[in-house]
Amino acid sequence: MGRKFVVGGNWKMNGDKNQINEIINNLKKGPLDPNVEVIIGVPAIYLSYVQSIVPDNINVAAQNCWKVAKGAFTGEISPAMIKDVGASWVILGHSERRTIFGEKDDLIAEKVAHALESGLKVIACIGETLEERESGKTEEVVFRQTKALLPAIGNNWDKVVLAYEPVWAIGTGKTASPAQAQEVHASLRNWLAKNASQEVADSVRIQYGGSVTGSSCKELGACPDIDGFLVGGASLKPEFVEIINATS
Ligand SMILES: O=C[C@H](O)COP(=O)(O)O
């Protein structure tokens, strides 16, 4: 099927210029598996700076954007601005945006639609909370979140990476087991075959995110339906290189 492994580093609200220089120098040193697509999600204020110092084999993403090109939206940034400073990706629907900032499925879908129309590529995040998992609602939740994205994505699936991030595994040190993650990825693919198309199901890359580390990445990366990772904490550390190289 030839899905290229894709590893994202989501720095969240971390880093200053010194730390950014260290992270980028470490990535430059690598060496990074050339068969892996690497995307780093940086705080908006550092997008230009990071874009000016990253090597060509690393793509830069914003961690959020608004749903229109410009206007009276104090504090927001648009896909047009992200593109203007040379970045090509945006992370949307992260669970921290959903829970802390109250973003709902329909707003996330509007953002995804506008980002894609504007020519950005999108990492679209989905995932269930612990309560939802424990009450047997994992599939219901991730299918609902993905369903909301279908009209927004339309024929642009080649510009989208899905990131399955169980909320209970984010920043908690509790990685989903390879079997737990593989199970959700496989059922998402089945769902996509029925609700989008077989081609989308076969070709879309689904990342796993949630406490991925240098020691958990190889086993997770070996699962047939896990096509990469979205990494938070460990993307700020030297072990990010090991995670990028998980499948080498
Ligand atoms: O976007 C990344 C995820 O929220 C995972 O974060 P984490 O690796 O720190 O658990």
Image (cartoon, rainbow, N blue to C red):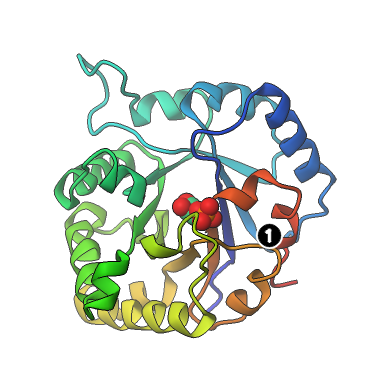
Specify whether 68 is left or right of 44: left
**Of residues 2 and 65, the one drawn nearer to the viewer in this rendering:** 65
Query: Residue at left 56%, top 24%?
Result: 46
Residue 211 visible in rendering: yes
Specify whether 136 is left or right of 224: left
**Of residues 112 and 13, the one drawn nearer to the viewer in this rendering:** 13
Q: Residue 4 in the image: x percent, y percent?
A: 58, 67
Query: Residue at left 70%, top 64%?
Result: 214
Specify whether 233 is left or right of 127: right
Query: Residue at left 22%, top 43%?
Result: 103
The mark tally for this picture is 1
Instruction: Answer yes or no: disc 1 within 8 Å of ligand 1.
Output: no
**Of residues 183 and 35, the one drawn nearer to the viewer in this rendering:** 183
Determine which residue is flagged by label 1: 244
The type of residue carrying mark 1 is Ile
Q: Residue 91 in the image: x percent, y percent?
A: 41, 45
- Residue 114, compared with residue 165, is above or below; it is above
Q: The residue tagged with tag 1: helix, strand or loop?
A: helix
Q: Residue 74 in the image: x percent, y percent?
A: 26, 15
* The C terminus, quarter of image: bottom right
Residue 231 visible in rendering: no
Which residue of the protein is positioned furthest toward the left in this rendering? Answer: 106
Dot 1: within a 10 Å radius of its alpha carbon, few (fewer than 14), some, or many (20 or more) residues? many
Q: Residue 69 in the image: x percent, y percent?
A: 27, 25
Query: Residue at left 69%, top 72%?
Result: 247
